[in-house]
Every structure is written in structure tokens, then in C-alpha cells.
Amino acid sequence: MQSTTFKKFETQFHQNLGVVDYLFYLEVVDHHEQITDCFLPNGRFELIADLGDQVSYFGKSAEWQIRPKVSVLGHHTHSVRLSCAGPKFQCVGAVFSLGKMAALIPDPAKRQYGSPTRLDNYFDNATNTLIHELQLAQQVHQKIHVLDRFIHRHVTVDHKQPAFLDHSLQLIDQHKGRISVADISKRVHCSTRHLRRSFIQHFGISPKALSSIIRLNYAVAQMINSNVAMSDIISDHGYFDRAHFYKEFTRIAGMPPSVYFNHARKLSRHFFETAIASPKIKPAISSMIARPHQRVMR
């Protein structure tokens, strides 16, 4: 028997507003099947503290590795897979707003991308302290507060990055990835070369690659959460045809969509469901008990 709980929280610290998109608690228990899942890249940084069994991570390097107990996952450009050593997956985490990790790690040269990075790599001896505080917290909302407070302690209030970069990120998100680099450059009044160089310097990814990832996420979220015909979704998100969508999906995910959509998605589907349902966090805590949801692609 499988049980799943997913709860989403807004930050309680004014200093974290605009930096933290949302905080979350996720718990999955399955005594009959191993808990595995595949996550598509989302263009955002995440801070995750694993509270349950040992979690393995499978990235583009095709090698399994143990995810750090508390890790910072820089926005990856390909899908990643997780596998839990036991019947229970449990974690608390924070998803940062697009491009806002700079408030937590101001120096772009220190940010690492792709695979999970130990929290201690950014903040000395932070892991043991954070895990201890999370273990002492009995209730879910208390654990979330511990993580929220940790971020609050380390956010740099007066950190500023170039305004044209913030504007560029807003354009990419507002257009759901359906905007060209040339159009972005025109709107923020800088050359495409300078825009690309600045993106790679500050965010570790080109504006074109980020746009592709954001567009795919919005398309997949709609496929998971609506009954709209796939051909209409593909067209609405700017893909020329089904072949174009399949090619882009396979390039980013490292697998064809038929394989991804026929996977159980015990963990990842919740983030798509909440993202499409409530793009901005409501004042109250939102929670959801997961229900089976699977779409077959042919």
C-alpha cells in the first residue's frame, strides 16, 4: 500500500519574499515497490533536506551516487533520477525563485550546477546543525519553519544583480519560455552576445537553454493536469508539431516522452500539479494528499 503527503508553504520571513518561491514537505511510503522517480529540469535552485531513507541520485554522468543529507541542487539541464533505499521517502525543501539564488550565494563563481552539492560547501558546518534542528522539530510546520529560518539567516538583503538580468528572467517566465533571445535582448536593451555571456556568468546557463527548459515544464504541467488534447498543448507552447516536441523532450530529458509519461512519478508529479494550480502562493498553507495520476503517451 502506498501513501503520499505533499504540503506547500509560503515563507514567513519578509527577507525571504521574492527569493523563496515556496517551501514544501513531501513524504511517500510504499512497502511493495521501490520508490524511484525522474525529475525534469525546472531552471531553479532547490535546497533539500532528506529526512527518510538513503537517497541515490542518477544524473547525466550515468553513475549512481548518494545524495548529501542536505543538498543544494543547482538548476540542471537534463533530467535526474532518484532512488530511495527503503520504503519511505521524506524530505523538506525550498524552491527558489528564478535567478534568485544570488541572494543566498552572491558569488556566481561559488555556485555549482547539476548534481547535488553539500550544504557545507556553501556554509561551513551547516548540515549537522540544520539536521539536528529538523530532528528536534516534531510537527511538519515546525520543520518547515526551521528551514525557512535557516534561509532567512543567510539571505543577503542588499545583494543586487544587473536589472536587465532580472527583467530577462521575468520575460522568460511570463512568456512560459516562448520568447527568443533576440526578442529578450531588444526588450532589455542589450546585445544578444552580452545577454548570453551575462546569463552564463550569473546563472550558469544560456537564456536559450533556460527558455527551453521553462517551456517544456509548462507544457508537461498542462499535460499532467488537464484533459486538453496533446496536439493542442504542443501547439500552444510553440512547438511546430509532435515530432518537434518529442525531439526537444528527448534532448532535455534524456528519454522519449513515452517512457517518462508511463513512469509512476510517485514524487515529481506533485510539483507539477501545485505549480499549475497555484503559481503564486496563497496566504494560507496549502496541502494535498496525492492521488494516482498517470497519462499514457503513444
Image (cartoon, helix red, strand yellow):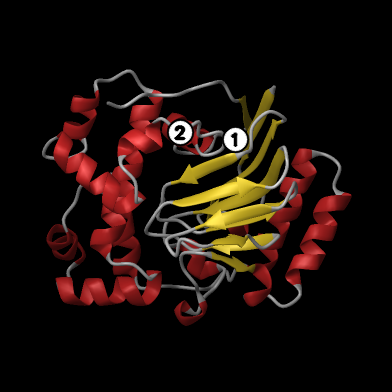
Residue 223 relative to residue 7: left or right: left
Dot in front, 1 or 2: 2
Q: Which residue is mark 2?
A: 263
Kindly identify the residue that appears in the image at 33 percent across and 18 percent down: 227
Query: Which kind of residue does numbered mark 2 sit on?
Result: His
Coordinates of residue 203 in the picture (x, y in percent): 39, 69
Q: Quadrant of residue 71?
A: bottom right
**Location of the C terminus (image quadrant):** top left
Q: Is residue 142 above or below residue 191?
A: above
**Location of the N terminus (image quadrant):** top right
Kindly identify the residue that appears in the image at 34 percent across and 30 percent down: 222
Q: Secondary structure at mark 1?
A: loop
- Does any portion of residue 143 appear in the rendered image? yes
Q: Is residue 88 above or below residue 171?
A: above
Q: Earlier in the sequence, mark 1 or mark 2?
A: 2
Of residues 290 and 275, which is closer to you in this image? 290
Query: Which kind of residue does numbered mark 1 sit on?
Result: Pro
Q: Which mark is residue 283?
A: 1
Coordinates of residue 65 in the picture (x, y in percent): 59, 62
Coordinates of residue 158 in the picture (x, y in percent): 53, 73
